[in-house]
Amino acid sequence: VQLVESGGRLIQPGGSLRLSCAASGFTVGNNYMNWFRQAPGRGLDWVALIYSGGTTAYADSVKGRFAISRDSSTNTLYLQMNSLRVEDTAVYYCGRDGAGGGNWGQGTLVTVSS
Amino acid sequence: DIVMTQSPLSLPVTPGEPASIFCRSSQSLLHSNGNKYLDWYLQKPGQSPQLLIYLGSNRASGVPDRFSGSGSGTDFTLKISRVEAEDVGTYYCMQGRQTPITFGQGTRLEIK
């Protein structure tokens, strides 16, 4: 089982970015999948969740700006991030539901700065 | 939102000694299906978090049996029977009972 995030980079406030999480060893669509983030030197925060049935949920801080999705053909999870703010700067992790195995990726760094 | 409160926030431990970390939730994490939606993660320095315990008391695959989890609907404990040097890092409890999913502040375990 492996999760590999990509897509993080330095971006200006107000910009857009799409993160990817390529999964192997299990089927993304059969699991609850999350995006989490960790600001520099801080604790863990939840960002978004997509249930196996396709329903989604978001933290209030990103609602209306971020969108979680998945592609069954490539077994990949995505996080589309729009209207980025300085406070969105963090390492972003994709993670599988605990009861499903609780696997996390290595993370991808998003830096929002002018 | 469910608030998760961990204690202690810092835990110095002598190798070979036991250690306990506590996590309290502001609402019950017990679902009508009987599951307690509380997970424990360890984030070792420079690494991503790794699952230790899921649904309150189930050890994740590959986790040494010196780690155990227990708890009621709102009070949970992670116990390490004999701390080893490789257990250093920050431990987080996380509730998945309802969204928003929330974490405790983290407990930093260090070796004396």
Image (cartoon, coloured by chain):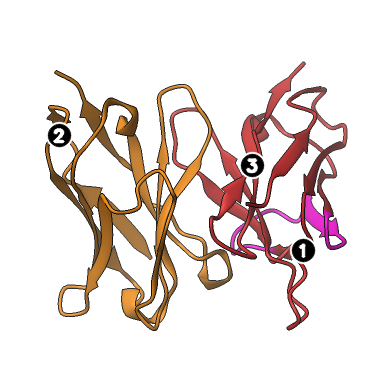
Chain colours: A orange, B red
Q: Amino acid at mark 2?
A: Gly
Instruction: Please give the chain letter of the residue carrying mark 1.
Output: B
Contact flag, marks 1 and 2 (Cβ < 8 Å): no
Residue B92's disc is 3
Query: Does mark 2 fall on the same chain as mark 1?
Result: no
* Marks 1 and 3, how far apart at CA: 15 Å
**Which residue lies under the disc numbered 1?**
B57
Relative to residue B79, is residue B107 depicted above or below?
Answer: above
Residue A14's disc is 2
Q: Residue at x 65, y 65 (%)?
A: B97
Residues drawn in magenta: B59-74
Query: Does mark 3 fall on the same chain as mark 1?
Result: yes
Q: Which image quarter: residue A87?
A: top left
Instruction: Please give the chain letter of the residue carrying mark 2.
Output: A
Relative to residue A43, is residue A49 depicted above or below?
Answer: below
Question: Residue A78 at x, y = what percent?
Answer: 23, 60
* Marks 1 and 2, how far apart at CA: 43 Å
Q: Amino acid at mark 1?
A: Ser
- Residue A46 part of the magenta-drawn span: no
